[in-house]
Image (spheres, rainbow, N blue to C red):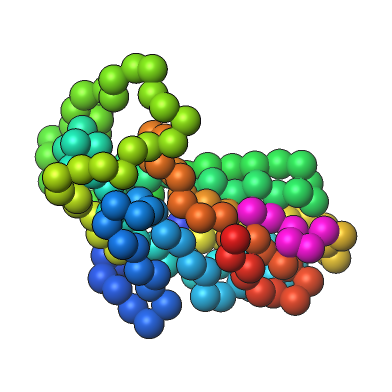
Amino acid sequence: MELTLKSPIGFFPDAGSPEVEAGKEAIRLTISRVAFAQGQVEIDLAALFYLPIAVADRYHHVEEALVLVVNDLEQADAGAILMVNTFIEYPAGSRDGPNQIEEPALPMPGRGSLVSEGFRGSWLNVTVGFPCASPIPRYRPSAWVYLVLENYVSNVVGLDLVSKTAVSF
């Protein structure tokens, strides 16, 4: 499945932006609009990530290291996309090389630790599109959406494509 950013990524809160309490969770996701027509799904996604400083400092641009994952139950398919703002053209040479500065210590625990002396984060707002070939999905929710960075995973949001609503879990 191919995921596509339909709008530039915004980094400011809006009315649908979630809240995260430092040390309680690292990434929170909300979906305010679900559209489904002619085999295409579009969602308006808002997220807030607030990662321990040691994790965030492993990246030049931590917001571009987040990965959006969509699992489509209907088609038994999945897709993932980096949250890189492809709508912006940066000066030549300014973004050369990998985003990751250093790798995490291995083995990593199942879930990322939320114990830290400091946190770094940002909001994300974007419209994302992906295909769904079924004219009337059988499963409700029809797809699952979440954000991930290393072993930090957001809440999961189910997309009910029949009623065109999002259900947060």
Q: Identify the image quadrant of residue 76.
A: top right
Q: Where is residue 33 in the image (x, y as percent from the top left)?
A: 56, 75
Q: Is residue 135 above or below residue 60?
A: below
Q: Residue at x 15, y 48 (%)?
A: 118
Q: Tell how many labels.
A: 0
Q: What stretch is highlighted in magenta?
A: 139-144
- The quarter in which the N terminus is drawn is top right
Name the side, left or right, on which 79 lies relative to 161. left
Residue 4 appears in the rendering: no
Q: Identify the image quadrant of residue 131.
A: bottom right
125 inside magenta stretch: no
Q: Position of residue 28 (x, y in %)?
A: 42, 59
Q: Main secondary structure of the magenta part?
A: loop
Residue, far top: 106
Q: In this orientation, which residue lies closer to the viewer: 2 or 156?
A: 156
- The quarter in which the C terminus is drawn is bottom right
Q: Residue at x 40, y 41 (%)?
A: 152
Q: Identify the image quadrant of residue 105.
A: top left
Q: Where is residue 40 in the image (x, y as percent from the top left)?
A: 67, 62
Residue 129 appears in the rendering: yes
Q: Which residue is drawn at 74% across and 61% down?
A: 141
Q: Which residue is drawn at 38% across and 82% down?
A: 15
Name the side, left or right, on which 154 lies relative to 115. right
Q: Is residue 15 above or below residue 102?
A: below
Q: Position of residue 82 (x, y in %)?
A: 41, 44
